[in-house]
Image (cartoon, rainbow, N blue to C red):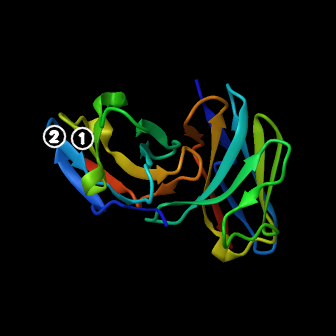
């Protein structure tokens, strides 16, 4: 149980285009989902917290107009990197909280490369 | 501000030998502490967590960790390492289980 999937697993796009990453909780309802960014050889950095049906809460320094988050259902959250640039290339990881469980379950990550 | 330090970037252990991965944290109140393992192509998997109570916590896959408040440490241990334990290990701290701050990770290599 408690499986979180991400799609796509990797994506290459041209500079200036937008990329959408999906995060799904497969066997539980996730009232809260989290988006992280991981640079090579560095730790995960929390970008934003999204609660189903409400606006996401962004961490300091994260541009909310750049990284659009939608949490429209209890099993799906999406992260859209708008007008992507090479510096947005990174590993994006989502996690989800199972209601009543005091832990986060992580997806396998999405590697984004912007050319 | 809360922070986590994992001083070892990578560690090599012989299969069957014991393992200890270090984690030191900085946090103003009683922390929630976690150890996660990340294998290539897979999401972070929770090994164990500490909220309160017994300071020696047992986790999955034979791992355990000990919370030492006086040393601000939460080191991960395993008495006998298996080749399948080779992965990246992350320590994390938070005010709960939500806004986690992660360390930079320790890559474990297991030699035959």
Residue A6 x %, y %? 67, 43
Q: Chain of mark 2?
A: B
Outermost residue on the front side: it is B29
Disc 2: which residue: B18
Corner quadrant of residue A104: top right
- Tell me if mark 2 has few (under 14), some (14-19) or many (20+) residues whose alpha carbon lies within 10 angstroms of its own: few
Find residue B57 and name its label: none
User: Which residue sits at x=72%, y=29%?
Assistant: A29
User: Which residue sits at x=50%, y=51%?
Assistant: B94
Depth check: B36 or B81 in front?
B36
Left/right of residue A18 with respect to residue A44 in the rendered view: right
User: Which residue sits at x=65%, y=40%?
Assistant: A96
Find residue B77 and name its label: 1
Q: Can residue B106 be seen in this snapshot?
A: yes
Location of residue A28 with respect to A68 vertically, above or below: above
The N terminus of chain A: image quadrant: top right
Corner quadrant of residue A66: bottom right
Q: Are marks 2 and 1 on the same chain?
A: yes
Closer to the chain start, of discs 2 and 1, is: 2
Left/right of residue A66 with respect to residue A41 in the rendered view: right
Marks 2 and 1 close (CB-CB < 8 Å): yes
């Amino acid at each position: 149980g408690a499986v979180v999937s991400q799609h796509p697993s990797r994506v290459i796009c041209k500079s200036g285009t937008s990329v959408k990453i999906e995060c799904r909780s497969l066997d539980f309802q996730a009232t809260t989902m989290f988006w992280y960014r991981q640079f090579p050889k560095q730790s995960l950095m929390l970008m934003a917290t999204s609660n189903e049906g409400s606006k996401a809460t962004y961490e300091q320094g994260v541009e909310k107009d750049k990284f659009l988050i939608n949490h429209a259902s209890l099993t799906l959250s999406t992260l859209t990197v708008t007008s992507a640039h090479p510096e947005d290339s990174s590993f994006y990881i989502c996690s989800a909280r199972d209601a009543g469980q005091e832990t986060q379950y992580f997806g396998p990550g999405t590697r984004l490369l912007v050319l | 501000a809360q922070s986590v330090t994992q001083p070892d970037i990578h560690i090599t252990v012989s299969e069957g030998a014991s393992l200890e991965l270090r984690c030191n944290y900085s946090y103003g109140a009683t922390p929630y502490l976690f150890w996660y393992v990340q294998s290539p192509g897979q999401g972070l998997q929770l090994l164990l967590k500490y909220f309160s109570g017994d300071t020696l916590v047992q986790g999955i896959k034979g791992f355990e960790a000990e919370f030492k408040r006086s040393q601000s440490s939460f080191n991960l241990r395993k008495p006998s390492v298996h080749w399948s334990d080779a992965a990246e290990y992350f320590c994390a701290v938070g005010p709960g289980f939500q806004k986690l701050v992660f360390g930079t990770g320790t890559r474990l290599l297991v030699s035959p």
